[in-house]
Amino acid sequence: MLEIKFVRQNLSAVENALASRGNAANLEALKTCDERRRSALQEIETLRHRRNVVSEQIADMKKKGENADDIVAEMRTVSGRIRAMEKSLAEDEEAVQNIIMGLPNIPHPSVPVGRDETDNELLRQVGTPAAFGFAPKAHWDIGEDLGILDFERAAKITGARFPLYIGPAARLERALINFMLDIHTTEHGYKEILPPFIVNRKSMTGTGQLPKFEEDLFKLEGWDYFLIPTAEVPVTNIYSGDVLEEEMLPIYCTAYTPCFRSEAGSYGKDTRGLIRQHQFNKVEMVRFAHPDNSYDELESLLDNAETILKRLELPYQVVTLCSGDLGFSAAKTYDIEVWMPAQNKYREISSCSNFEDFQARRANIRFRRKGKKGTALIHTLNGSGLAVGRTVAAIFENYQQEDGTVIIPEALRSYMGGAEKISAV
């Protein structure tokens, strides 16, 4: 959430920044409501002060036996005016809050200006895509041919966009989760978290999914609870409402969770395979950082995510998202895109973002600077480390053999009972 004082003082700059994101925000309504709100606050304070002063005067007059009826009648009018102003103030405060909550974050100055993903900037490519002596198959065909992915039975159980992993595919998914968690905890210094997979409205609001994106979420009928779209939500909210000590920062947390997304607006996209599912597994990295060095933390976070792909020897590229492709809460984002031979293109497998104080203001996560009075908002960051189903898909496609089998990356073999290859079950 943007700070209302900052928006008020930089109205034109904020409008331009949001326009660079493709958000044609006209802040005149906000300006009008905010000016009316501040004027009402001032008038209410003046009227309350007058009422307090006159109340003492009335009490003094009554002690002296003097007639205070006219002044009492006047104060009734003043009290009525205060009540009316308070009602109007509450309406304007709600309107201001609603507008502010719907405004996305302001892009960092280093973010390239652009309209959509076609304007993202390539930062680097790592690894060389393999040359196949045969036409590479899509991961869903590989999985179905081997009898280890079954989308038809998953649809019978639940519906479209749900996967059913069988035998070696199920074990590979589990192996990847443990592999990712082991690297992040033992090598990168993250504390492992196993959070609730269901959260309340306050938590969703704290990280920015609500109120704007409720249609993208799965809500529990009869409850004001939601299935999490990412571990970012429960893990970030661990510290909601807290004041941390400066020496505690940075805090690194990693969590495996299933993730649930309605994929509203994506109908017709990636209808086959593991790329865009309603339910998928992900290992998430979340950082709580000092504002002075959160962009150094972003680079380190990105490096941690890249480590997984390097160990798996999967070709990938890193892009800096342009302003028009940024997520709602992000000030800057790097996407890591893994090579998918069957599609002959790179596909997103991780996003690493710095939200600066945008989420911290919504969730009220603050820290106390050593030796200084007051508190300040922390910066929050998160990144996929990695999306597990997409990693399975990338392994299937990049390690496929002409006979239909799949070589298991060497880094995963100890997690797969020493197996070197996945064959038909």
Image: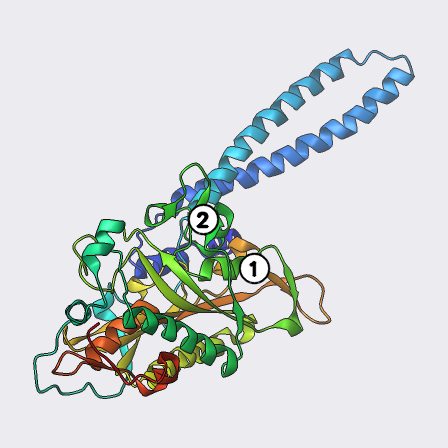
Quarter that holds the C terminus: bottom left
| Residue highlighted by disc 1 | 238
Image quadrant where residue 125 sits: bottom left
Q: Is residue 411 left or right of residue 356?
A: left
Q: Residue sitting at 60 percent across and 73 percent down?
A: 249
Closer to the eye: label 2 or 1: 1
Above or below residue 225? Residue 420 is: below
Q: Secondary structure at mark 1?
A: helix
Residue drawn at x 66%, y 74% is: 247
Q: Nearer the viewer, residue 44 or 134?
A: 134
383 lies left or right of 121 = right
**Are the two marked residues, 2 and 1, in contact with CB atoms closer than 8 angstroms?**
no
Give the residue type that dot 2 points to: Ile
Location of residue 187 in the rendering, given as x and y in whole percent from the top left corner: 49, 83
Residue named by callout 2: 100
Residue 222 visible here: yes
Crowd around label 2: few <14 · some 14–19 · many ≥20 (10 Å): some
Q: Looking at the picture, which amino acid does disc 1 mark? A: Ile
Q: Which numbered marker is on residue 394?
A: none
